[in-house]
Image: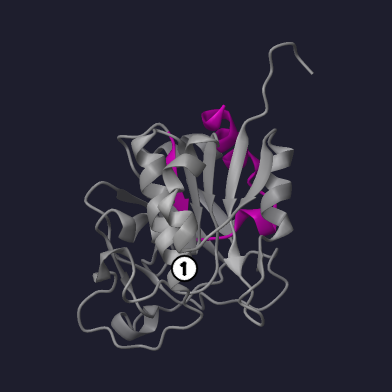
Amino acid sequence: MVEGYRRPLIGICSRPGEQDPELSYINSRYAKAVQDAGGIPVALPYGFEAAAIASEIVDRIDGLLLTGGGDVSEEGFGGNNYAKGCVARISFMSAERDVFEYAAVRAAWEANKACLGICRGMQVMNVSFGGTLLRDIAESHPDHTINHWQEKPWNVPSHTVRIEPASWLAQILGGLEFEVNSMHHQAIAEPSPSGRIVAWAPDGTPEALEFDMKHFFIGVQWHPEQTGNMPQLFDAFVDAAR
């Protein structure tokens, strides 16, 4: 190792076990992607107690990774999470997870810590800073033509995304069109006033979100930790955390 090199500590948001809510876990693929990029992955707690000390937790890490999982609850993140008129069923909510991630992402913002959101993580970034979501893509946009929920294997791409040429994401990935996987039924309705959509699926579904006023505050709707074909995204994230 080069003298003076320091591996940044990357906090990975954990999720409750669907069969046993007293258990929490992270998918090992997130940890591997962070470690392969030169970071030290550490699973973060969640819950009301953790939310109360979120700023102290974030102060001890160098970067925050918001992971995928269940739907955002109606009551969390200020209670204005979903576009008006949406009534589709949502599932696998966790108020304890919501309250911690809301506190953690805002603490990361205030502390200028690098933040990467994946799938639900991108949606959390959006609603934490005033954006809204669709409860279900098909409910509000029946003309969407892509199946955004693929079955296993999850490492196989299922559609393409088009990336805004002037975005930081395009510079990081080194291109404007990529094949990605897709495991979500919700999507951004209105972007946060602080953010902007920088990638789209062929049917117009928002696929990436950037916050230009921060050095690295990026969310993607797909799961690059599963496909393993975008190591440069995790490299850029860990480099920004360093």
SS at badge 1: helix
| Nearest the eye: 90 or 161 | 90
Instruction: Return the x and y of residue 87 as percentages of the image width and height.
Output: 30, 88
Instruction: Return the x and y of residue 24 as percentages of the image width and height.
Output: 64, 66
Q: Residue furthest right?
A: 1
| Nearest the eye: 22 or 191 | 22
Magenta stretch encompasses residue 126: no
Answer left or right for 82 relative to 224. left
Magenta stretch encompasses residue 230: yes
Answer left or right for 130 relative to 95. left
Q: Residue at x 32, y 56 (%)?
A: 128
Q: How is the image coloured?
A: one colour
Dividing the picture into quadrants, the one containing residue 26 is: bottom right
- Rendered view: 188 above or below 115: below
Asked whether residue 122 appears in the rendered view, the answer is no
- Rendered view: 54 above or below 93: above
The magenta region covers 216-242
| Mark 1 crowdedness (10 Å alpha carbons): few <14, some 14-19, many ≥20 | some
